Image (cartoon, helix red, strand yellow):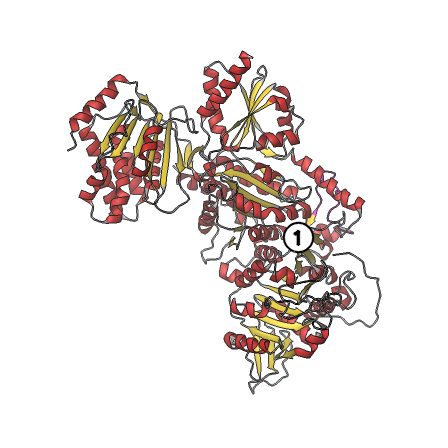
Amino acid sequence: MSFMKKPEVSHSRLSHNSLGRTLREYEGSMSTLCAGCGHDSVTAALIQAFWELSIEPCQIVKMSGIGCSSKTPAYFVQEAHGINAVHGRMPSIATGAHAANRNLYYVGISGDGDSLSIGLGQFIHALRRNINMLYLIENNGVYGLTKGQFSASADVGSKAKKGEINQQPPIDPVTLALTLGGSFVARSFSGDKAQLVPLIKAGIMHNGFALLDVLSPCVTFNDHEDSTKSYAHTRQYDRPVVHADFIQPHQSISTDYANGEIIPVELHDGSTVLLSKVSNDYNPIDRAAAYQYLLDRQKRGEIVTGLLYINENQEEFHTVHRTTEEPLRDLPHVALCPGSAVLEEIQHLYR
Amino acid sequence: MDRPNRYRILGKAIGESMNTYVNDFVVKIANVNGTGSASANGLLMKAIFRMGIPVAGKNFFPSNIQGLPTWYEIRVSHDGYRARSGKVNVMVAMNAQTYARDLAELDPGGCLLYDSTWSRDKQLARDDITLIGIPFARLVNATFSNIRARILLKNICYVGALAAFLNLDISVLENLLRETYANKPKLITDNLKAMEIGYQYASGHFDCPLPFRLERMNATAEYMMVDGNTLAALGCVYAGATVGAWYPITPSTSLMDAFKAFCERYRTHPDGKRRYCIIQAEDELAAIGMVLGASWNGARAFTPTSGPGLSLMNEFLGFGYYAEIPAVIFDVQRVGPSTGMPTRTQQADILLAAYASHGDTRHILLFPADPAECFYMAVSAFELAERLQTPVLVLSDLDIGMNDWMVPKLSWNEHDVPDRGKVYGFEQLRDLSEFHRYTDSDGDGIAYRTLPGTHSKGAYFTRGSGHNRDGAYTEDAAEYQEVLDRLQRKHDHAKTLVPAPIACRRSELKTGIVSLGSCDAAIREALDILARGGMELNYLRVRGFPFSREVDEFLEQHTRIFVVEQNRDAQLKSLLLLETGVDRSKLTSILHYGGIPIDSRCIVQSISEALREGEAA
């Protein structure tokens, strides 16, 4: 949330996206997070993804709640509106904003405290409503701003910096999203930008609620030995099972996916996500199988990552609500107010 | 037949010994919840209204679906008084459970109708009233075989009997029944039959009408009978609200139900596409969040709620105030504290609403006094919320929200274009060199805002954390205070924008009443009664907070002021003491907080006693 303007540095060889914009134009203010924080890597991936997608910055809406993660919307796409809601309540702000204008790109950045403790209710209800947004959880298992308490995603047996061992079972946003009918469920690691960027792009372009749980270690309070959310632990147990490639609408697809090992999923806007299985026994379009697989691997302490489930045909919020195509906030008053003749007619009912 | 002669004699006895009360009495119906009595009582009231006679109805219902006692009070008043008088002249005692208290509540000289299918305990009698037994259950059971129909039609049967007793035009009732069940002919036949049985029995066994009787008038032609939640919803439609988020809670639920019904009719394209979006939230925390999100993004959005919901909304209301986001909240107040009595009325959220949320937070409040004002204030609320960029709370209550009131017909100016407040559009942003969200460029405390998706230059970060005039995060004392002081200037500016109070005053009088909301009807009647007794008072009805200049003036110009309100803690009085310079010793509270709408009798009593004491001293 702190505002520190980045120094202007001009690079002569910066490349441009199809809008003629450089990557620099998708950056935000200086991060005030700790050096080495996973969240800053996520920010970099977001900048890269928005730049590659060539989205007009002012068409992007950045939203967050409270916590370290919730500061990050200030660090990317300076020319986009941002809103920093109260703790755990970003999903309701997002729902209302999306109801008012269905035509913008909504990205919500949350954390494990913000989404899985205080905001668990709002998170799962936004997911159930299939609000068209990317919902990214920067998950580090710990409360950073209040100095090191366990969060609800801390694993059983994980040790806090001060030595306490967590004994309560964790809430896993991924399996939770699968059971609640999430239409796009993904997990990644802040240290794996190659995996993260296409997932962010697919999540933004997915027509519905895209949950992206990103393990994003806290260098200050949860990066020690015996923490299950440290860089070392995450690297050791990271098991990518599906690789997602994001293909823009007019980009040609060179990969041969006739052999069935690659599943193409066409998105609403004509872009395509190519899902290639890293693990042969994983099926990202079968909810029940995906769920079972994740539970089995969880028991072994493995962290399954990738685009774990996608259903592009699930009706998003406005389709369910049969809202008119034009954003509600742009409707002129004459389209909303029935006028004096109708008022007369209505009043007749109460005579 | 139940010894008809005895009753006939009794009937005559009343008629001869007592005055007749034409179009000026109260009928109260005691019943069991879930038996369909509400529609029968509504029918009765509407028939009186259609006879051109001013009428008011109050429903006292339990927080229950079936089985608990429920009452409906119908006041007929040729003078057009819409409050409870505090009297009961005719009691229809259909609930054995409450028979004793219903009998006790009747004013001397009144009549009590009961179901004589079962005999009454002889102990339960009074010499100063007339008991009229009609075997409603037996009559209905002899005619209808379906069990559910018997229960429902017993109510229509007493409506028929009352038609005979009160001289209610039976053809008006018939027309109403035909309109109500236009699509269900079988129901029309059954209802007409049940009504006929009651009517025939009453007129065949008793001298009709009773001394409490109706005569046609022509005093309702320009009025309608409607509840406040319906008209608040209609106001939202006319104001152009497109997003409604809510969590169901008594007594506000019917507001969103009505909004939905109006939108289905008037905001839906033939292809099924909707120009509105109603979201049933997971709780009130989310409901207000959705409203803020939608308003931040440029839609007019609202949420209806009641006390417990308002408590949950506190944190977000503070966010709306500090981040300067419009929002419209309808608080249809019910009895607190805590869950309280969900189906009873009170005005006990005033202080909570005024300062909802932690920190130095204050809100704009509107106080409608009847359903018509719910319509107009709904429209004003959206206007104020957008012009002032802050939450606006409309404090209605269960009495206004859920009871049908006789209100003058509404009017709408076709040429009214809503004022959406200070919002920079594309061209303005394009031509601006720089945009700063919280800079007071016009000196009225209101800064310009921008909507996402308009122009890159309009981008800013909306936050509930400390921010400076540019909208940037700050922990600097001076920068923080600058914004907080401007918010206070904005709130002061609102005094000139909220609806002005309504005064009934003569300059020579130095004693007055200050009140708000649904107390109005009872106060207006009380003022007339007091004046007839030689006690004349001025009256000011507050309609908005922060208090406008007229409120201060009224307080200054009177030496003795009664503050009438429906809560225990004198919340309006507290707010006046906090927000104006009024001398505490001038103010005397008249408080009514049992959950039943305030009546004129209690106000008259309190004021006349106080004034007499004053004279004695």
* Coordinates of residue B245 in the picture (x, y in percent): 53, 51
* Chain of residue at mark 1: B
Q: Quadrant of the N terminus of chain B?
A: top left
B516 displayed left or right of B147: right
Q: In the rendered view, would you say B12 is above or below B395?
A: above
- Residue B447 in magenta? yes
The answer, for residue A351, to whether it is visible in the render is yes
Quarter-of-image position of residue A19 = bottom right
The answer, for residue B167, to whether it is visible in the render is no
* Coordinates of residue B92 in the picture (x, y in percent): 30, 33
Residue shown at the point (59%, 52%) measured from the top left: B289
**Mark 1 secondary-structure assignment:** loop
* Coordinates of residue A287 in the picture (x, y in percent): 52, 74
- Dot 1, crowdedness within 10 Å: few (<14), some or many (≥20)? many
Q: What amino acid type should be assigned to the residue bearing mark 1?
A: Leu
Seen from the viewer's position, the closer of residues B76 and B526 is B526
Quarter-of-image position of residue A50 = bottom right
* Coordinates of residue B530 in the picture (x, y in percent): 47, 18
Seen from the viewer's position, the closer of residues A218 and B320 is A218
Q: Quadrant of the C terminus of chain B?
A: top right
Assign the magenta stretch its main secondary structure: loop
B341 displayed left or right of A188: left
- State the extent of the magenta-drawn residues as a range: B433-448
Quarter-of-image position of residue A283 = bottom right
Total numbered labels placed on residues in the image: 1
Q: In the rendered view, would you say B116 is above or below A78?
A: above
Q: Would you name the residue on which mark 1 appears?
A: B451
